[in-house]
Amino acid sequence: MSVMRLSIRTIGRRDAGAVSVEEAAERVLAGDPDAFRHIFDRFSRPVTSFIFDIVGRRDLAEELAQETFVRAYRGLGSLRDGTKLSTWLFGIAKFTAWEAIRAERRRGSVGIDEIAEMPSESDYARPEVQLLGRELNGVIHEALAALDDDKRTVFSLRIFQQKSYDEIVDITGFTLAKVKTDLHRARSEMRRRVGPYVEGTV
């Protein structure tokens, strides 16, 4: 973990934004660890958000996101040709989050029972808008917490992360039929729980 954090802090930004994540991965494999910054910058927020959807605790999500990137950095050489980097990275995030949930359950404490909220996309929203956003976030994540692990993961990947069905199959290891079934049931549960608080559908 310390090696990873040191690398991230000391990476220069002389060509920030000029390198694709695929090129960055190739540069890391070629012996340039600083190039991993591009991957971290691109995916740190969505990965943290995805993990938060699964575990329901901001502090734990941030910790597990760091662990995800450490594992990705160390395991980049195992990335198969043709495998999409984001799919591979979210697969690691899913495994890391599920591992943490199982560990907490063994200790008798389920992480998703504590509902928290991720930072707002904007720090400049009106106070009343921020309040409504926090209330809705709480309702949504409370509803997410009521889903089982499989449905919560599939719902987050499809609805919040906008992953395709094929990507979800690759990330989770589920069959396409299971992904579609879990998503349908998760939508129904979320609509039932969140519907009274918002207009429209989930």
Image (tube, rainbow, N blue to C red):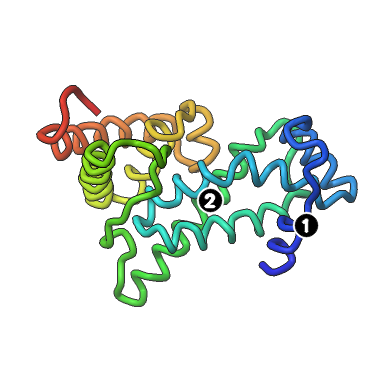
Q: Please indicate, yes or no, whether residue 28 appears anywhere in the rendered image.
A: yes
Circle 1 residue: 10
The residue lying furthest to the left in this view is 196
- Front-most of residues 35 and 145: 35
Q: CA distance from mark 1 to mark 2?
A: 24 Å
Horizontal and vertical percent position of residue 124: 39, 38
Quarter of the figure that contains the N terminus: bottom right
Q: Is residue 115 left or right of 13 when viewed as pictured?
A: left
Horizontal and vertical percent position of residue 92: 57, 50
Residue at (38% x, 49% y) in the render = 118
- Front-most of residues 126 and 25: 126
Circle 2 residue: 93
Horizontal and vertical percent position of residue 62: 49, 58
Callout 2, which amino acid?
Ala
Q: Return the disc, 1 or 2, that comes first in the chain's sequence.
A: 1
Image height of 196 relative to 152, above or below: above
Disc 2, SS: helix
Q: Hey, which quadrant is residue 67 in on the image?
A: bottom right
Image height of 103 relative to 157, above or below: below
- Front-most of residues 163 and 14: 14
Residue at (75% x, 37% y) in the render = 16
Horizontal and vertical percent position of residue 169: 49, 35
Q: Which mark's residue is nearer the viewer, 1 or 2?
A: 1
Q: Hey, which quadrant is residue 83 in on the image?
A: top right
